[in-house]
Amino acid sequence: MAKTALVAGASGIVGSATAGLLAEQGWTVHGIARRPVEQAGVQPLVADLQDAAGTAEALKDVQPDAVFITTWLRQDSEAENIRVNSAMVRNLLDGLPKPTGPRHVALVTGLKHYLGPFEAYGKGSLPQTPFREEQDRLDLENFYYAQEDEVFAAAARDGFTWSVHRPHSVIGKAVGNAMNMGTTLAVYATLCRETGRPFTFPGSAAQWSGLTDMTDAGQLARHLLWATETEAAHNEAFNIVNGDVFRWQWMWSRIADWFGVAAAPFDGTVRPLETQMTDDAAVWREIAAREGLAEPDLSRLASPWHTDADLGRPIEVVTDMSKSRRLGFTAYQPTDDAFFALFERLRADRLIP
């Protein structure tokens, strides 16, 4: 019999990739979101996870074998991040009918588990790299920890298994997403080509010269499904990255070449994209109108603040995958290929010219 999945945040980068993979694998997929987008093989459920009663009403007839939590809402402070995002997880798990059989819940968080929340990102005493899952939580309030605790509490109450997945920056397609480096860089490169501005790396010398890694959305989706279907992976937390490492001084020129722009020499100065792109909304509207693009609103495509946070980190950030490898997850995705595949998809979908 086909298994049933519930994907929370099905319209986002991770959620859409996960829902798509599950549908391809023959699962019955329900996608819950405030504003669902049409996706083949996904049955939309409309609910705001901040609304406990509305969430329970939307889920009253859903009895999933697996739940994938891939959503969050950015707030103005970490205290509010904790309040809102922990409530969303709690409302989702409380709103589901009690399991009548085995159920697995997979929660997607990220490397802020190791690097700290936005208010203290990459500062203070940080664990050694490469990051490993057994490293203790930081002595800081963090909405990822609060989300985990909600899953742990519900699992103890309802008897389901769980897994936590910690990707690095995710490469994938979604419009209106708060954390979207791949599309942000595609839009930035397009603007540089349009205006003749140099394609300038916005981040730190540590990121330019140090080793790093990233996570393709498809790779993360495969990892989520693997953990769901692998008993040895139940009740465990995992890092998940593509499997390669690179330096941005190499990747930056690769991206520049794809867009036909020159990569500016890096002189060690941090030049945030949020500053560089401050006045670009009107330029993007002009490009969209001329080229017949599907999204003229720059803010729906680019999230420069988050790309700045990732590329501005003062330390080298690499992630250990040994735990997953030992348990049998062997999928691999070269990161430059992941970027290029995204750019091709954005072009095919008329999101960039």
Image (tube, rainbow, N blue to C red):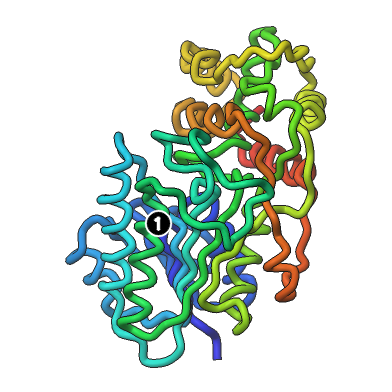
Residue 305 percent location from the top left of the image: 48, 28
Q: Mark 1 points at which residue?
A: 145
Residue 92 picture quarter: bottom left
**Between 342 and 318, which is closer to the camera in this rendering?**
318
Residue at left 45%, top 72%? 67
Give x and y (percent) for residue 213: 71, 44
Q: Give the left or right position of residue 201, taking residue 337 as reference.
A: left
Residue 322 placement, left or right of 114: right
Q: Is residue 346 visible?
A: yes
Mark 1 Cα-neighbour bin, 10 Å: few <14, some 14–19, many ≥20? some
User: Element type at marker 1?
Assistant: helix
Tell me the residue at 46%/89% (across/down). 102
Q: Which amino acid does label 1 sit on?
A: Tyr
Q: Where is residue 150 in the image (x, y as percent from the top left)?
A: 33, 66
Q: In which quarter of the image is residue 183?
A: top right
Residue drawn at point x = 75 percent, y = 38 percent? 211
